[in-house]
Image: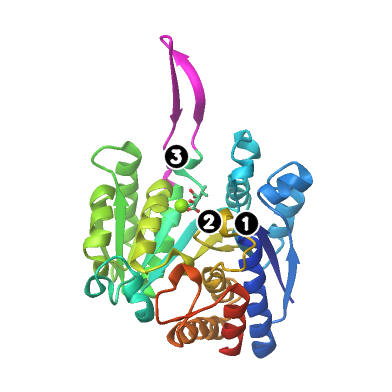
């Protein structure tokens, strides 16, 4: 049996993971993968029950799992808690605790949704890129000070630190992935200003020597941000640090038309975690209108990367394509002339299309 830990989390996390589990069960019935599900809490939901955003028990269960399917965490209710109790702490606990060093965020343009992109169709059409974001280092995890007083003035600081092995590990994964795609890596840094970026660039150049068939170029992050919307088709694999990857991956989601459709995989040493890149959307939680496609596509990535069930993953991706082609749209991607559906309804249709 293959054990999957499902962590719905907060807000729409509950609805969208339920929907993805329904789809996974249907796929399992067809492909006989032998999936087994267990649920754990995280974020505000865990805080309410256990007084902490992530229990050791939940983390341990994930460590033993074949894969983790994660919804989203966060909500207004918990925004004023001290930092160590806030829902986001669960995400960092899982990233660090499971050693999830690489976050893969693919952007695909669905021909059916090309007109929902705020960018010109001829500009985004055919773009297909993958952001490989370093996820357990850099300024997210470096030493920080919430508040101190210097010369009578309050200040705060965070630190960007990268070691050679950390950069090597993420760069290798990016190059390996590029080999299976179109063979191009763009490394994004701020080497004209930051020391950590200068080391980043040096290590990337060194690692590239082991991949003579993969083309490498470098962009400064400000230019990369501009190039992403000017000419997204130039990119295949983008490799970058934690914070630049955070920012650029939200920007890249716009290319695809809707953030509701964007899946992600966080690849780890012990296990890997899969989640949609949108958040917990507390404003629409419980209304049955959330788009589950990003989570369902994340479940497909789980099948592909953690369970090596590529056929099953493709079946899910095709079922989503078909559902969109047949004109079904959740509220986030609905435009006149299409069929508006809720979370459960679209899940049923995807299952029928499997
Ligand atoms: C993401 C999110 C998180 C991050 C937040 C919720 C802490 O934006 O996964 O991209 O910044 O990494
Ligand atoms: Mg982000």
Q: Is residue 184 magenta?
A: no
Measure the alpha-carbon separation of dots 3 and 1. Answer: 28 Å
Cβ–Cβ under 8 Å for marks 3 and 1: no
What is the crowding at mark 3: few (fewer than 14 residues within 10 Å), some, or many (at least 20)? some
Q: Is residue 340 visible?
A: yes
What is the crowding at mark 1: few (fewer than 14 residues within 10 Å), some, or many (at least 20)? many
Q: Is residue 187 above or below residue 319?
A: above
Q: Which residue of the protein is positioned furthest toward the top in this rendering?
A: 151
Where is residue 303 drawn, in percent x and y?
A: 58, 76
Q: Is residue 88 above or below residue 142?
A: below
Residue tagged 2: 279
Q: Nearer the viewer, mark 3 or mark 2?
A: 2
Q: Which residue of the protein is positioned furthest toward the front in this rendering?
A: 336
Along the line of sight, which residue is nearer the eye, 159 or 201? 159
Of helix, strand and loop, which one carries label 2?
loop
Span of residues in magenta: 142-164
Residue tagged 1: 11
Cβ–Cβ under 8 Å for marks 2 and 1: yes
Of helix, strand and loop, which one carries label 1?
loop
Q: Is residue 280 visible?
A: no
Rendered image quadrant of residue 116: bottom left
Quarter containing the N terminus = bottom right
Where is residue 160 drawn, in percent x and y?
A: 41, 37
Of helix, strand and loop, which one carries label 3?
helix
174 relative position to 342: left or right: left
Residue tagged 3: 139
Which residue is drawn at the image coordinates 68% and 45% (left, top)? 53
Disc with the residue nearer the chain's start (3 vs 1): 1
Measure the alpha-carbon separation of dots 3 and 2. Answer: 21 Å
Which residue is drawn at the image coordinates 41% and 46% (left, top)? 243
């Amino acid at each position: 049996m293959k054990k999957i830990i499902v962590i719905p989390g907060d807000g729409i996390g509950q609805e969208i993971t339920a929907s993805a589990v329904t789809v996974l069960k249907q796929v399992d019935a067809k492909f006989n993968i032998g999936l087994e599900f267990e649920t754990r809490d995280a974020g505000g939901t865990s805080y309410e029950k256990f007084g902490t955003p992530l229990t050791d028990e939940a983390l341990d269960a994930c460590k033993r799992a074949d894969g983790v399917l994660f919804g989203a965490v966060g909500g207004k209710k918990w925004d004023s808690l001290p930092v160590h109790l806030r829902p986001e702490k669960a995400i960092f606990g899982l990233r660090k605790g499971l050693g999830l060093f690489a976050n893969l965020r693919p952007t695909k343009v669905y021909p059916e949704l090309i007109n929902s992109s705020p960018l010109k169709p001829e500009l985004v059409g055919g773009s297909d890129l993958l952001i490989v974001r370093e996820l357990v280092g850099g300024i997210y995890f470096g030493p920080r000070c919430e508040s101190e007083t210097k010369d009578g003035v309050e200040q705060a600081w965070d630190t960007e630190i990268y070691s050679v092995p950390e950069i090597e590990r993420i760069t290798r994964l990016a190059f390996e992935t590029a080999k299976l795609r179109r063979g191009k890596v763009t490394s994004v840094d701020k080497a004209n200003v930051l020391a950590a970026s200068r080391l980043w660039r040096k290590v990337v150049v060194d690692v590239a020597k082991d991949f003579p068939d993969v083309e490498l170029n470098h962009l400064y992050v400000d230019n990369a941000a501009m190039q992403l919307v000017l000419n997204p088709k130039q990119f295949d694999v983008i490799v970058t640090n934690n914070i630049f990857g955070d920012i650029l991956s939200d920007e890249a989601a716009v290319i695809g038309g809707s953030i509701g459709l964007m899946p992600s995989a966080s690849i780890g040493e012990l296990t890997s975690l899969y989640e949609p890149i949108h958040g917990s959307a507390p404003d629409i939680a419980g209304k049955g209108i959330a788009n589950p496609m990003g989570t369902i596509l994340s479940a497909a990535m789980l099948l592909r990367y953690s369970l090596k069930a590529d056929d099953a993953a493709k079946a899910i991706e095709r079922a989503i394509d078909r559902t969109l082609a047949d004109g079904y749209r959740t509220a986030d991607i609905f435009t006149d002339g299409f069929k508006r559906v809720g979370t459960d309804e679209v899940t049923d249709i995807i299952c029928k299309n499997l």
